[in-house]
Amino acid sequence: MRVVAVLAMLLAASTATVLVGAEEGWPGEPVDNHVHMTWAAMTIEVNEWADENPDIVDLADVGKSELGRSLWVVRLSDWSIETKADGSAKEIIYIDGGHHGNEYLGTALAWLSAKWYINGWNDGNEEAVRVLQNSEVHVLIMLNPDGNDIDTRWNINQVDLNRNYDHYWNTCPTTQPGSSAFSESETSANSVYMNTVVPEADLYVTMHTGVWIMLYPWGKWPEQPSDWELFHYIRDDVHANISDIPIQNANQGLYPNCGTSRDYGYGVMGFPTFTFETDDEQFVPGSAESLEDRLGEEMDVMRYLIDNVWYWRARLSVTSFVVEDGDIALGIENMGHASTSNATVRYIDDGEVKWTSESFGVNATNSTQTILDASNLTMTDSGQFELYYQKRVIDSSLWVNESIPTEQITISEGSEKGWLPFASPIWAVLAIGLAGIRRNERFIDDCGQPDQTNVSQNADS
Ligand SMILES: [Zn+2]
């Protein structure tokens, strides 16, 4: 099945060549020319992608390496429409590869992630079309072109780029983390991209090569991250339906590490973040066929994460909302797979928050019934209710405000008590008004991590 999947994945390439390659074992075109791409070869190719697929490929030069090579981001979506068909914002996915210049398979997997959707779109593949109509997939294929072209882990300044991020930078016995966080142009450019272009991403995957494993936060601590329910759900779903690749907390699955893009992506940006590692046996004779399986298997997991990105946050949906006697009886369902710990109902009028309820939490894939004290709420003729909550438990995750549809709201008889000055039930219902989903606001708190250090030896990956 996996070989079939890989062949399907590469469909838009030369079919004959793929089949010959498969018969001869791994890799077959087009992967073999991309296991070790030079930066120049990749530059030509991504520009060809953009030239030949202007409807879905938007190529951006988002910064320079220390030696001045462009860092290309391939941005994939159906660019004929800015939003989803229903008018809501597209989901955002961010992928990078090639932090470590000698980890070719990680770079190749980032390349393949972009190529799969381009090929699929052009072939009318249902999944690829669905993803590109509903999402933006941003892929920075090669973050360390200088190191890539001279076959070294480090960048040209001999810095380990994946220890150079501003998240507990240099607090582990790490070798070569740089002179300060983001001292290197490559990591600095990556963080600027995260913060300015894709801050609303609900998935970040960073591609490496080392061992056969997928890692989620933290590298810094052995404890499970605050959004452990989300990560465990994904782990269990992948294991049940796609792959038996080990999926673990990075600190325990690999070794303690600090200042990584993974911990930064989760701890500072609030993204659900995974490090994909492909095993490093690519140059061992006889391992070729296994590698093809493995690249295809990781691509299957990648596609699953992208296709289901809508679920990788809390998605609160009001099932009942009854205002009565100074209370709000609230029924909430969480359609997403992440918990939220500090949701509130707010009353908004004239663009201002006039009232905020006590906070409540909703576990992942759960429903909650709660009574909120609304005795000090005053409704007006133009106000409306909304939910205000964080997408995930991690402190740095985005806050969202989503209007509660009028048709969900019931104002019962007798609720006049204490409701001034527009206390009539009918008046209140009319006053709440219809409103669409408002644009999310981003409020970033300083990241709050468990106050614990784990000092252990650092290994290489
Ligand atoms: Zn690596």
Image (tube, helix red, strand yellow):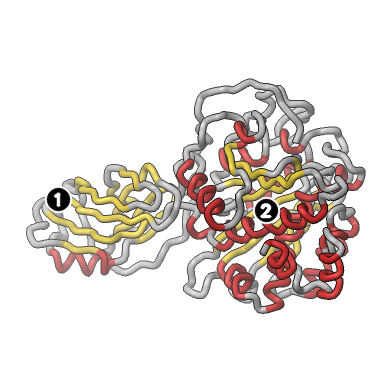
| Quarter containing the N terminus | bottom right
| Quarter containing the C terminus | top right
Nearer the camera: disc 1 or disc 2: 2
Mark 1 crowd level (few <14, some 14–19, many ≥20, 10 Å Cα): some
Q: Secondary structure at mark 1?
A: loop
Where is residue 459 shown, x and y percent of the image? Answer: 74, 29
Where is residue 438 shown, x and y percent of the image? Answer: 43, 62
Q: Secondary structure at mark 2?
A: strand
Horizontal side, residue 385 vs residue 210: left or right: left
> Could you tell me which residue is drawn at 84 percent across and 60 percent down?
25
> Could you tell me which residue is drawn at 68 percent across and 68 percent down?
117
- Up the image or down, 419 lies above or below 267; here it is below
For ligand 1, the image quadrant comes to top right
Q: Which mark is residue 103?
A: none
- Closer to the chain start, of discs 1 and 2, is 2
Using the rendered image of the protein, determine whether residue 89 is visible from the camera's viewpoint: yes
- Up the image or down, 317 lies above or below 78; here it is above
In front here: 222 or 434?
A: 222
Mark 2 crowd level (few <14, some 14–19, many ≥20, 10 Å Cα): many
Where is residue 389 shown, x and y percent of the image? Answer: 39, 49
The type of residue carrying mark 1 is: Gly
> Could you tell me which residue is drawn at 19 percent across and 46 percent down?
373
In front here: 312 or 439?
A: 312
Where is residue 431 shown, x and y percent of the image? Answer: 24, 66
Q: Which residue is mark 1?
A: 326
The type of residue carrying mark 2 is: Ile
Using the rendered image of the protein, determine whether residue 58 is visible from the camera's viewpoint: no
Name the image quarter holding residue 261. Answer: top right
Separation (CA) of disc 1 from disc 2: 48 Å
Q: Which residue is mark 2?
A: 95
Name the image quarter holding residue 43. Answer: bottom right
